[in-house]
Image: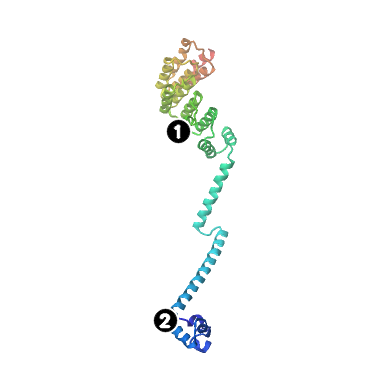
Amino acid sequence: WLKPFWAPVASAPMEACFGSSQPLWLSRAWSPGASAAAGRLCGSGRWAATIAGLMLLCCAATAAAVGALCTGWGLVLLRSCPSAGPAFADFRTRKVSKMVRTESQDTVNRHTLLQELRDGKRKKEDLVRNVAILQQRRLLTKRDEYNMVIVLLGKLRLWKEAVGMLADMERNGLKPDLCCYNAVLKALQISGKFKESVEMLTEMWAENVLPDEVSYMIIIATFGQAGMWVEALQLLADLEKRGVKASCKPYSAAIVACGRCGQAEKAMQVFDYLPELGLEPDGLTFGAILGVLGKDGDWRGAIDMLRR
């Protein structure tokens, strides 16, 4: 076992190197007495096993040091190489993402986010992202801010998110007012959700948020878009039954709803009913009835209405 470690030439015998079967330094280092005794000790199995263990320990330590050095150089090369493998790429991505999130949290500006929503000039994804940031971090603190966000969500046809803003207001200690409810009704109209509009109207009465003529006008228009002129007229009856003070706006919406469904006669009845309520038709009402008559092909009636 000693020959491969100490012989300079592997094929040469040890006698050629040291002149004997063992090196002199070995006998002198381990011999406590005479050289003969040292020879006997070195030839015993116990000392041979001890020396073999020491040599293996030295080899293991050397291998560990070399391995650590190679590992260190490998990490340096890995960090200096962008395409060093999927594991490092994932680690780098996570680290960068964390830095970006931390930076965005520190530099987020409430005023800037609200101003971008008011302008509405950014992409839909950016606007939705701004709304999410404002909502998650509870940066919306006023009713008019919530109202602005609801209107924006309605234009983006995100009616579920618009309805959810009412619950978010209550979580932040703000009670939704009439303007917020009307904004939600408008969002539902844009998306054509007539059933949800009626449910929202019922909720308004239950929450003691009294609907006004604008509320009824929006829902009537929603029914008109869905081709449900009967339900639109029923809402007019509900408005009068509950004593909601109204102008010509909801009646004009009912006229348009009847005209959309080809019910010119019903539309004319609603128009003629206005004087009985003490209401004078305005430009919006005349425009609605003229549109119905034109669609029905009644040009004589349209000319007569123009004269009035």
Describe the element under mark 2 as helix, strand or loop: helix
Q: Nearer the viewer, residue 14 or 166?
A: 14
| Residue plotted at (55% across, 63% down) | 72
Describe the element under mark 1 as helix, strand or loop: helix
Mark 1 Cα-neighbour bin, 10 Å: few <14, some 14–19, many ≥20:
some
The kind of residue on which mark 1 rests is Lys
**Residue 207 in view in this figure:** yes
**Percent coordinates x, y for residue 55 in the rendering:** 48, 76
* Quadrant of the frame with the N terminus: bottom left
Q: Nearer the viewer, residue 259 or 150?
A: 150
User: What residue did someone put label 2 on?
Assistant: 45
Q: Nearer the viewer, residue 86 or 198?
A: 86
| Residue plotted at (45% across, 86% down) | 40
- 243 to the left or right of 133: left
* Marked residue nearer the N-terminal end (2 or 1): 2
| Residue plotted at (58% across, 42% down) | 106
Image quadrant in which you'd find residue 148: top right
User: What residue did someone put label 1 on?
Assistant: 160
Mark 2 Cα-neighbour bin, 10 Å: few <14, some 14–19, many ≥20:
few
Q: Is residue 45 above or below residue 186?
A: below
